[in-house]
């Protein structure tokens, strides 16, 4: 099979011909149709996340067709169209898994990090961590729902929040008029730069940029009792800030991965709204170009590799 492979830290992806993978017990093999390109992929390729599997096939927003099953598979059948997210395996036995917090499992393994992912023509996945893709959702448009949607990327979150009757203010890089116009087009009531004061105190703020210096900015923008959520898996160091901006019961928290329940609930919600993903498609061989566009902030929405579109 054709695959784009990371062979060392902070190196460019290389096109390689690899043997087609075979599913083990409890696994299915997918003929990959599309795979989203995520900022986490960028952190892995750039060496900002430690100790990935090497060599590694990145990619954890996989949409594919089941074309082979391993022993013991009972939830999926050949021909099913499914999606595979970042969380690729958990032990199922630890205190976190038993409490419904499997995203915090100490033994968890992640797609496109410790498990080969979807920047390839085929991928294997634990059937427990495969989600049925709703009918009517095209492959390329469905791929970002598997991470950008579950964690809440900005252009998807705006649509969900507006569907729930919430007012959304969008903050972008200073001077990024195109992104601000895009946010307003999606339904944001206001859009400005990170240095601009919001029109009103915020109930909550979600940070997507991996920039720790924005945490104090966000804390100053939320009302008393408000919450600031750091949505990325990697962020630069947060600078020191006066206790006064955290006081009055403001909350600072992170989001770690997702659970299977999150996945099933969000995909059902996305189908009901329905969520429209804005995507820019790249061929498999152009995975590095897609990462470059993400790194430079040139994307409107999400980059997706169209591996074998139907």
Image (cartoon, grey):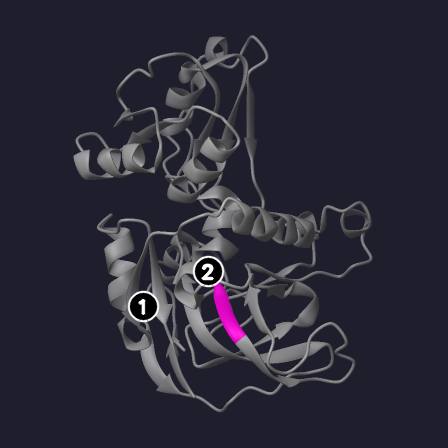
Instruction: Please name the predominant secondary structure of the magenta segment in the image.
Output: strand
Q: Which residues are magenta?
A: 60-64
Q: Residues within 10 Å of mark 1 (few under 14, many from 20)?
A: few
- Magenta span contains residue 134: no
Instruction: Mark yes or no: residue 55 visible.
Output: no
Q: Nearer the viewer, residue 40 or 34?
A: 34
Q: Which residue is mark 2?
A: 142
Counting from the top left corner in percent of width and height, residue 35 is at 43, 67
Q: Which quadrant of the view contains residue 216?
A: top left
Counting from the top left corner in percent of width and height, residue 6 is at 39, 72
Q: Residue at x 46, y 60 (%)?
A: 142
Q: Residues within 10 Å of mark 2 (few under 14, many from 20)?
A: many
Instruction: Mark yes or no: residue 279 visible.
Output: yes
Q: How many numbered marks are there? A: 2
Determine which of the numbered discs, if any, sits on residue 179 in the image.
none
- Magenta span contains residue 62: yes
Quadrant where the C terminus sits is bottom left
Q: CA distance from mark 2 to mark 1?
A: 29 Å
Q: Nearer the viewer, residue 66 or 245?
A: 66
Circle 2 — which element?
helix
Counting from the top left corner in percent of width and height, residue 118 is at 46, 72
Q: Nearer the viewer, residue 291 or 8?
A: 291
Q: Residue at x 45, y 32 (%)?
A: 162
Q: Residue at x 57, y 46 (%)?
A: 269
Q: Which numbered disc, 2 or 1, marks the residue that appears first in the sequence?
A: 1
Determine whether label 2 and label 1 are within 8 Å by CB.
no
Counting from the top left corner in percent of width and height, residue 130 is at 63, 66
Q: Which residue is mark 1?
A: 11
| 196 up-or-down from 87: above or below | above
Quadrant where the N terminus sits is bottom left
Q: Nearer the viewer, mark 2 or mark 1?
A: 2
């Amino acid at each position: 099979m054709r695959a784009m492979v990371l062979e060392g830290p902070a190196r460019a992806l290389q096109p390689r011909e690899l043997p087609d993978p075979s599913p083990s017990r409890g696994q299915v093999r997918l003929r990959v149709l599309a795979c989203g390109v995520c900022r986490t992929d960028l952190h892995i390729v750039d060496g900002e996340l430690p100790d990935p599997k090497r060599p590694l096939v990145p990619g954890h927003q996989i949409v594919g067709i089941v074309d082979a099953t391993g022993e013991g598979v009972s939830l999926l059948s050949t021909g099913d169209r499914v999606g595979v997210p970042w969380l690729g395996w958990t032990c199922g036995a630890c205190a976190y898994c038993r409490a419904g917090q499997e995203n915090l499992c100490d033994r968890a393994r992640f797609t496109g990090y410790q498990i080969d992912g979807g920047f390839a023509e085929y991928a294997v996945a634990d059937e427990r961590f495969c989600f049925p893709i709703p009918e009517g959702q095209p492959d390329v448009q469905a791929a970002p729902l598997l991470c950008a949607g579950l964690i809440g990327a900005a252009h998807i979150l705006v649509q969900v929040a507006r569907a729930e009757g919430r007012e959304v203010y969008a903050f972008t890089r200073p001077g990024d008029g195109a992104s601000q116009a895009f946010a307003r087009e999606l339904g944001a009531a206001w859009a400005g730069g990170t240095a601009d004061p919001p029109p009103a105190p915020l109930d909550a703020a979600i940070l997507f940029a991996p920039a720790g210096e924005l945490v104090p900015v966000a804390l100053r923008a939320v009302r008393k009792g408000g919450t600031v959520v750091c949505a990325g898996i990697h962020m630069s160091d947060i600078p020191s800030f006066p206790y006064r901006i955290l006081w009055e019961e403001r909350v600072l928290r992170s989001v770690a991965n997702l659970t299977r329940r999150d996945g099933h609930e969000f995909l059902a919600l996305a189908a009901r709204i329905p969520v429209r993903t804005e995507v820019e498609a790249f061929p498999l061989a152009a995975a590095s170009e897609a990462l470059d566009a993400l790194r430079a902030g040139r994307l409107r929405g999400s980059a997706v590799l169209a591996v074998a579109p139907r």
